[in-house]
Amino acid sequence: MICSTGRTIVTPGGTITPISPPIKNPSHFSHFTSILAPKSYPLLIFTRISLLHLKTQLILTRKPPPLSSLMAMDRSAASSSLMLTSGASGRINALFSVQALKSFLILINAVVLFLLLPFRGRRRTVPISSSTEKPKDFEKLQDCGSQRKMVRVPATIVPWKSSSSSGSGGVVVDQEVATRRALAIRRVLQDDDPNSLRESSLFVTARGDTLFTQLWTPVSVRIRGLVVLMHGLNEHSGRYNDFAKQLNAHGFKVYGMDWIGHGGSDGLHAYVPALDYAVSDLKNFLDKVLGENPGLPCFCFGHSTGAAIVLKAVLDPKVEARVAGVVLTSPAVGVQPSHPIFVVLAPIFSVLLPRLQLSAANKKGTVVSRDPEALIAKYSDPLVYTGSIRVRTGYEILRITTYLQQNLTKMRVPFLVLHGTADTVTDPEASKKLYDEASSTDKTIKLCEGLLHDLIFEPEGQEIVNDIIEWLGCRL
């Protein structure tokens, strides 16, 4: 038998063997009997029976049996091989215990959370009142004789006040977005071209993001068709102001949308969490445009990544049925990263560090136009992003180009594609592949010898614009 308080084991012969350390929990007794000497089988059986009796007595009385009743047993079994020790086995068991496993999992979890921590500081925000009342300067209508000039400013124009002054129910707008949006609106207000009416408005997506949109309407020319314009990566719809006004002169009403993370729209500048967002936003924007202009043919124009967004949207049969044709300049159907390793690393880092600006991913010495004035105008524009490409944005471009190349045969909408043969941003060979594989019966391609990426802003840009207007006019 084993006495927990006396720290002894009494063998059948009456021998009392001290135990160190003391046994504090009767439930541990079975552990000690399991390591008895293999030759002492009678002693083992007797000890197990005694343990069972002792455990029962401890449970019922909560007191150990008197020590005097244990002293009468024979000492002859003292020579029996009996050893009780935790030894190395106890340390190994402790190493692989449940507690150690939990500690290890907590450590792993902490490391993963650290890697997923967004490396982005907290930015200041300003609130926008959710009240339905419009500011006093929401709409300014000026009736000038027979010509009515209207400049419309969105109701949610950003009020410049601190976040501490916001009440409950306020809508929070990022300070960076507020600055960009205010500049985009200001440019619309300052445009006083007598031949085109320029307006701006905000378009709220199904996700709750607010996108900046603008509209160019011909003043004295009959409207014959619609053009929805999608700008390229890092720029905004306002860069196509002159192009839109030339379309106005030929009877086209032009809508422009700054997609997520660009121009006056919501989102970190040039950060695109998913280009499918832009595709979905374009589809919803087309619904709005067509609803406002029933009976007019609608065309889409897209440049570079904007062209890729247009292409993926018109692959949807519902959109295909509502669009009369698309014009694509330097479409991002095929792109070549600065190094092949980025194709392998992009899926990983787009999850771990999506907003990271990766300068190594930019191609060195890449020029988008041969016109110095066009380059200065582009890169001095605060609404144009001039930093290194963000990891997630780059990965999304790789994803959409891969998708398009696998689905070119589904393209059935009439299209015109123009690409410069000297373009080092997007691949002109991919545009040739689009033309060859597309199922469209009405398709045209023009490869412009020696021209770079921004075709409309090249020295030969006016020729490009004339080709586009001629192609659109033939399909009204």
Image (tube, rainbow, N blue to C red):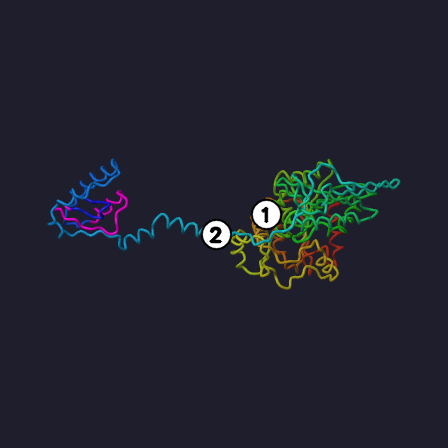
Badge 1 crowding class, 10 Å Cα cut-off, few under 14, some 14 to 19, many 20 or more, is some
Residue drawn 30% across the image and 54% down it:
91
Q: Position of residue 231 (x, y in %)?
A: 68, 50
- Judge whether residue 451 is colored magenta: no
Give whichever of 70, 126 is nearer the camera: 70
Q: Is residue 219 visible?
A: yes
State the residue position of label 1: 274
The part of the image, by quadrant, that contains residue 222 is top right
Q: Where is residue 428 in the image (x, y as percent from the top left)?
A: 63, 56
- Judge whether residue 23 is colored magenta: yes
**Horizontal side, residue 49 vs residue 166: left or right:** left
Q: Where is residue 227 in the image (x, y as percent from the top left)?
A: 72, 44
Q: Residue furthest bottom?
A: 365
Determine whether the residue tagged by mark 1 lies in a helix, strand or loop: loop
State the residue position of label 2: 112
Determine whether the residue tagged by mark 2 lies in a helix, strand or loop: helix
The mark lying in front, picked from 1 and 2, is 2
- As measured in the structure, the alpha-carbon distance from the residue carrying label 1 to the one carrying label 2 is 23 Å
Q: Give the range drawn in magenta.
A: 11-35
Q: Where is residue 399 in the image (x, y as percent from the top left)?
A: 56, 50
Which numbered disc flags the more N-terminal residue, 1 or 2?
2
Q: Quadrant of the C terminus?
A: top right
Q: Which amino acid does label 2 sit on?
A: Val
